[in-house]
Image (tube, rainbow, N blue to C red):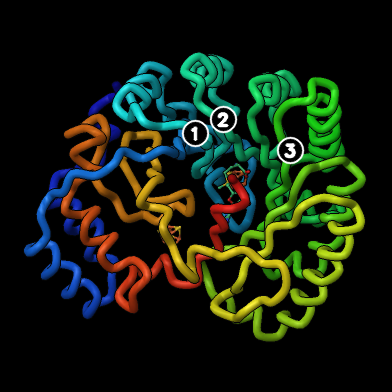
Amino acid sequence: MPDPSILQDANAFSLDRRNFDTLDDKTAQIWRSEFLKCKRTKRFQPTRLVIEILNSCNLDCPMCRVGQHGIDLERRMELQAFRDVLNQCTDVRSVRLNGLGESTLVPDFSSYIDELNRRSIDIELITNGTATDEIYQQILSCGGKLFFSWDAASPDLFEMLRRPASWESCLRALQQACAYKSKVGKGLVGLLFTLQKANVKEFARVVELAVESCVDNVQLNVVKGGSLRWLESDLAEVLKQIELASTTARDGKITVFLPDQINGGEIRGEVQVTSGTHCTVPETEAVIRWNGDVQVCNMFNPYTLGNVFGHGFKHAWESTFAQVFLKNLNTANCHPYCKTCAYMPKAYD
Ligand SMILES: C[S@@+](CC[C@H](N)C(=O)[O-])C[C@H]1O[C@@H](n2cnc3c(N)ncnc32)[C@H](O)[C@@H]1O
Ligand code: SF4
Ligand code: SF4
């Protein structure tokens, strides 16, 4: 159990402030009034969890900044707490280790993987590529999926966006993982490209790199936070990159997962439904933050349902806060973070 001092208040009063004070006045009024009318409701348990076992990082990527203060291993979910989460969520078939941080830095990381494997839970990891080969091989040996974040094909730009990582060592780690995957005939390796102003000309060459490295798939994510006004002038380039990347992927027989919209603008071709178009994610998926807070999805929407180490997972999952969020999802009054969301659940099927 984590030290109680790290827990933010997750009682109804503080969640009211945390969740509703961040909405614009009109939406907050609607959500608060619905909150008074909604009741706690029994729900099927989630089948997928995203668990943040560390809220800290060895890199300081400019679009994220989680690592700006260096590594702080205090901001981790201990193994026993991780087991407690899994014990509370008995229907879970798949766990993605992701979060605002780099999970692989947790000192006994391999024990977390053993724990999932022992319970026959499918494993997914999103990583910055700085972990050891042994870590990546352990996940592939369990048939798990590895997603390397890869935002550029030019070494200099890669190192700027993934500071202070080394292109050479990340590339070596990726290639070793791919070689190991083919040797054992298990697991999957994908790339996760986060589109931002600095890398609009990189996507097609990242897909080329994926083909050369025998990666299974590449998905296009879109940066969140800050203005996307730059897209107005760069959209033509983004579309060109998508077209080139699609051809490369087809010829190289790998999959690219492309969003059906970017910032609300329609993308045509072989695209996937994004959660910004229609979202069912919070019906079956929950995020557990390092301190036990239960949130709604892999996109780190900050809306919080409760805390697993407070009143417990079931209490959070079936809470009135969950009902209000689900009631407004896919409507004009949806949470502002959901508008134009680039999440593509299909990329993880
Ligand atoms: C927050 S990281 C955590 C996992 C790991 N540290 C990594 O970088 O792969 C998960 C994914 O979110 C992406 N990401 C970072 N900042 C983002 C932002 N502002 N908007 C959208 N995605 C972002 C990263 O590129 C990465 O692919
Ligand atoms: S490596 Fe991941 S968690 Fe770390 S700063 Fe970069 S995007 Fe954020
Ligand atoms: S941010 Fe909103 S739209 Fe996107 S996956 Fe999460 S709940 Fe769905």
Q: In which quarter of the image is the C terminus?
A: top right
| Quarter of the view holding residue 266 | bottom right
Categorize mark 2 by other alpha carbons within 10 Å: few (<14), some (14-19), many (20+).
Answer: many
Q: Residue at x 41, y 66 (%)?
A: 337
Categorize mark 3 by other alpha carbons within 10 Å: few (<14), some (14-19), many (20+).
Answer: many
Mark 1 residue type: Ser
Q: Which residue is farthest left?
A: 36
Q: Residue at x 37, y 25 (%)?
A: 86
What is the distance, in whole Å, between disc 2 and disc 3 at their CAs? Answer: 12 Å
Foreground residue, 228 or 6?
228
Q: Position of residue 226 (x, y in %)?
A: 52, 70
Q: Quadrant of ligand 3?
A: bottom left
- Give the labeled residue for mark 2: 123
Judged by depth in the image, the label closer to the viewer, 1 or 3, is 1
Of mark 2 and mark 3, the one earlier in the sequence is 2
In the image, is residue 216 above or below residue 246? above
Of mark 1 and mark 2, the one earlier in the sequence is 1
SS category of the residue bearing label 1: strand
**Disc ID at residue 94:** 1
